[in-house]
Amino acid sequence: MSAALAAEQALNGLQLGLMLFLMAAGLTLVLGIMDTINLAHGSLYMTGAYLAAATYAAAGSFLVAVAAAVVGTALIGALLEMTVLRALYRRDHLSQVLATFAIILIANEAIRMTWGPQPLALPTPRALSGPVELLPGFLYPAWRLVLIAAGLGVAVLLFILVTYTRAGMRVRAGASNREMAEVMGVDVKRLFTVVFAIGAALCALAGALLGPLLAVQVGMGESILILAFVVVVIGGIGSIRGAFVGALLVGIVDTAGRALLVPALASIAIYVLMAAVLFWKPQGLFPARG
Amino acid sequence: MKTGSVALALALAMTSAHAADKVKVGFLSTLSGPGGALGVDIEDGFKLALKSTGNKLGGLPAELVVVDDQQNPDVAKQATDRLLKRDKVDLMTGIVFSNIMLAVGPTIFDAKTFYVSANAGPSQYAGAQCNPYFFNVAWQNDNLHEAVGKHVAEKGFKNVALVAPNYPAGKDALTGFKRYYNGKVADEIYTKLGQLDYAAELAQIRATKPDAVYIFLPGGMGINFIKQYAAAGLAKDVPLFGPGFSADEDVIRAAGDAMNGMYNASQWAHDLPNAENRKFVADFEREYGRLPSLYASQGYDAALLIDAAVRKVKGNLDDKEALRAALASADFKSVRGAFKFNRNHYPVQDYYLRVVEKDAKGRVTNRTVGTIFKDHADAYANECAMK
């Protein structure tokens, strides 16, 4: 493998990892703080992509489309938390899985009834639609560079939010010991709604940004949801830092696997990684609960 | 023709023979989920044909029982039992995916019910397991790949990279392509089924420098790949080829400008210049507000075939021999032009080369460029014992 190809694959791995991080960040918080398995996380990603595509078709501006997707999906997420998820917190995981699986089916059919069964178009902004020459002879798609920049930006913002703000402190407290946080006067009800809405907004951002590279279609959330769960398990449930490291690991191992291994092995590479991590660190790399 | 009229005379001679008062068609298809767009297109095409005949098949009132198989073989099996035993349908059609076709085929054939496939064309039913109750009015699964393979070879491409998902139909597709493409294979890449991101594969393709790329990535996978292919800037230097179902209206609508210049092969195109096709395309656009896809054309033709066959047996659906002969004679005007059945009940038909580009109205869509195969049959007919 030449140096240019290796560099390109490294960027590919980084980019895939950062997009998975956007998905996994919300998922790990919901799972860690609320102790709730939310299979419908992928549906929020799909909702974001569809809102972006529909807004783009109407307004013609990608920035407006991303903003509409993020705000719209955050509102939908908050509403979902207040109406459905809230009733599930005290229930066991099986009830949560069943109920959120039902949300997947309802979301898929609702999208299909609204926008039809045909996939939608979400074109790349014209200026960023081609490749750029990073070094002489080393081309890389401009849009993927945007994804890398956006992913890194969100990661830094989240890090600051969680580490240095009062809200972030509450989130960390909730993740490490929910009962104790409640006793210390954290308004857990409101915290849950806000966390869920932020998770939904991050999903929507991923959906809108990936729209130009992926098919915006019914059921798009399920395939990426599995990867997001792998990231959460590897990183340690409830840990943003774990989600970040886990996402980059999954992105790089998946890309390297596809570049270097035979197809049968490449498709299981990330699951081998997950099994290996769980063997040595059963709680994941950075468990939130000590 | 001769056997047809003999069977018809026999049927008329039988005292029990009488015309049915309606034709009941079981339409089992994938109508929801990621593959749902294909089934909906077939359904829309079928219903459009019924509308043009005044909701009649062969002069009898038509009743369509529509069931969603959810792209799940178990659901499809239960639905088939219900259609055959409770609804007692006279014929069945609609299935999109070959794995579902293979799962429910035996039940349908055992019930001596005719199945007219408007899409799924598995090699099994074309070869050794061909069945007197199975008719395919679309293609055998390999055909469109064979057509592109022949075209790519004729165009002088000598070093082609191939991409397909790592599952049986993916390997069959590339086998079909290589049956007529005899040049060098730069790289044969098998990806995970349902893969989202193709960056690693695209980097590999760029490094191996093929002179063309052939993909068989159905549904969302194809949309993902084509968008990323364009974003990587490969589309400018390395032409992309695919079968018709990787480059029809459903994919074009999602991938848009990224599809420009993609060559593909199909047994049908919306600009084929025959009267039936012009009427079909115009009616479809008026009814549904979008251009039809090849799936829609296949659903439309399936209805026309059933219509012609029922008319030919004068509504006597109980005479299976006569109905089989009538279906096999394919005495209808297909929107794709010339059409006839081989002895394995799969099509013998022409295959066309199409290219995706902007048309006069500014829409990105397919334009027919030429004919790749004349009267092409599939490679499995010889293994079929049926006469």
Image: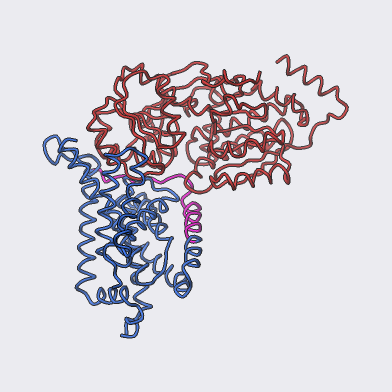
Chain colours: A blue, B red
- In the rendered image, is residue A65 in sight? no
Quarter of image, res B358: top left
- At x 31%, y 64%, the residue is A236
Q: Which residues, given as a range, are shown in magenta?
A: A103-126
Q: Is residue B47 left or right of residue A57?
A: right
Question: Residue lying furthest front in this view?
Answer: A280
Question: Residue lying furthest right in this view?
Answer: B15
Residue A106 forms part of the magenta stretch: yes
Q: Position of residue A189 (x, y in %)?
A: 38, 78
- The N terminus of chain B lies in quadrant: top right
Viewer-proximal residue among A27 and B294: A27
- At x 33%, y 49%, the residue is A211
- The C terminus of chain B lies in quadrant: top right
> Can you say whether A192 is above or below B329 in the image?
below
Residue A290 forms part of the magenta stretch: no
Question: Residue lying furthest left in this view?
Answer: A136
- At x 30%, y 85%, the residue is A184
Q: Is residue A254 left or right of residue A6?
A: right
> Can you say whether B94 is above or below A166 in the image?
above
- In the rendered image, is residue B348 in sight? yes
> Can you say whether A275 is above or below B98 in the image?
below
Q: Is residue A235 left or right of residue B366?
A: left
Viewer-proximal residue among A225 and B255: A225
